[in-house]
Amino acid sequence: MRYTALAAPQNALKGIILPDRPLSRKWRHTLKFHLADAVGLNIFTGYDTDYVAVNHRHYQTSLIVLPDGIVEEWPPQSFAALETAHFEAILEFAPEIVLLGTGGTLRFPHPRLTEALIRARIGVEVMDTPAACRTYNILASEGRKVAAALILSPEC
């Protein structure tokens, strides 16, 4: 099956590709596009393993990012420095899910460290920092109560 680009008006979506012939009824799907309205939310606008930018403001120390707030200078300055108290402090924000960004290397904390979050029925996902930033942006734009706890240090 060949595909061709659909010519669209200037203010419409560009690059939509449609087949040259109609698809059979069983393969027809309707897609709805919605503009993401992230006004008033904290969104990652840049990131790497040793820094993040939230709403174009750069941070180079560990922090917690919430859709409606930022906890600057989250105490653990390295993965090895993680303690139970660091995760217990997140409980006060009552997120649905916590995304732990561990720098450039994916490392899993000992289960006893995140036990308080699990007992409170808060999901915990561990990923490298860039993946945590991307996932946070998606969840926050969907209106989810998400917290990105990011370990930022030169050694990560």
Image (spheres, rainbow, N blue to C red):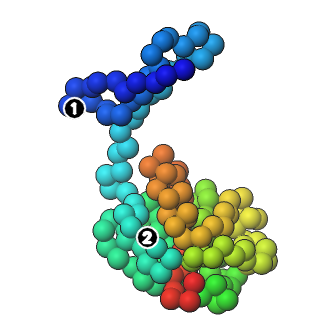
Q: Quadrant of the C terminus?
A: bottom right
Asked whether residue 56 is in view, the answer is: yes
Q: Quadrant of residue 116?
A: bottom right
The crowding category of the residue bearing disc 2, from other C-alpha atoms within 10 Å (few below 14, some 14 to 19, many at least 20), is some
Q: Nearer the viewer, residue 83 or 77?
A: 77
In front of the other: 13 or 97:
13
**Percent from the top left, x then y, of residue 137?**
46, 56
Give the answer, above or below, for where 1 lies relative to 74: above
Residue nearest the viewer, comparing 27 with 57:
27
Residue at 77% x, 78% y is 110
Residue closest to the eye, 122 or 137: 137
Residue denoted by label 2 = 47
Q: Are marks 2 and 1 in contact (CB under 8 Å)?
A: no
* Residue of label 1: 11
Which residue is painted at 51% across and 86% down in the image?
153
- As helix, strand or loop, the secondary structure at mark 1 comes to loop
Q: Residue at x 58, y 10 (%)?
A: 24
Say what amino acid the circle numbered 1 marks.
Asn
Residue at 54% x, 13% y is: 23
Residue density around tag 1, few if under 14, some if 14–19, many if 20 or more, within 10 Å: few
